[in-house]
């Protein structure tokens, strides 16, 4: 998958560093995705953009 993204995206800083698949995403009561929780779980607690 990284090879495909590297061919499509020219700037190296735009490549996804981590690709994970999940059955469900954490959501708020109103149905929005909790991105802060994803950042903490997927990146080992580091605060990086998603």
Image: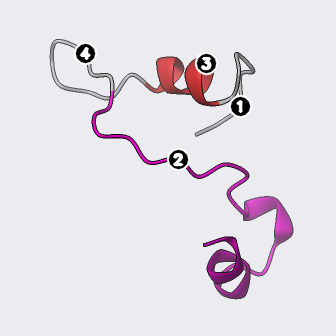
Q: Is residue 44 left or right of residue 23?
A: right
**Which residue occupies the foreground of this view, 18 or 48?**
18
Report helix, strand or loop for mark 4.
loop
Residue where numbered disc 2 is placed: 20
Name of the residue lying farthest toward the bottom: 7
Q: Spatial distance from mark 3 to mark 1, Cα to Cα? A: 9 Å
Looking at the image, is 18 positioned above or below residue 1? above
Q: Is residue 12 above or below residue 37?
A: below
Res. 38 mark: none
Q: Closer to the camera: disc 3 or disc 1?
A: 3
Q: Residue at x 39, y 22 (%)?
A: 34
| Labelled disc at residue 48 | 1
Magenta-highlighted stretch: main secondary structure? loop
Q: Which residue is mark 4?
A: 28
Q: Are marks 2 and 3 in contact (CB under 8 Å)?
A: no
Residue 3 lies in the magenta stretch: yes
Q: Position of residue 20 (x, y in %)?
A: 53, 47
> Which residue position holds label 3?
40
Q: CA distance from mark 2 to mark 3?
A: 14 Å
Q: Label 1, label 2: how many angstroms apart (C-alpha)?
A: 15 Å
Front of the two marks 2 and 4: 2
The residue under the point 58% across, 52% down is 19
Q: Does 50 appear above or below 17?
A: above
């Amino acid at each position: 998958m990284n090879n495909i993204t590297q061919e499509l995206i020219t700037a190296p800083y735009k490549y996804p560093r981590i690709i994970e698949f999940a059955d469900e995403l954490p959501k708020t009561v109103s149905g929005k995705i909790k991105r802060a929780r994803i950042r903490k779980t997927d990146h080992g607690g580091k605060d990086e953009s998603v």
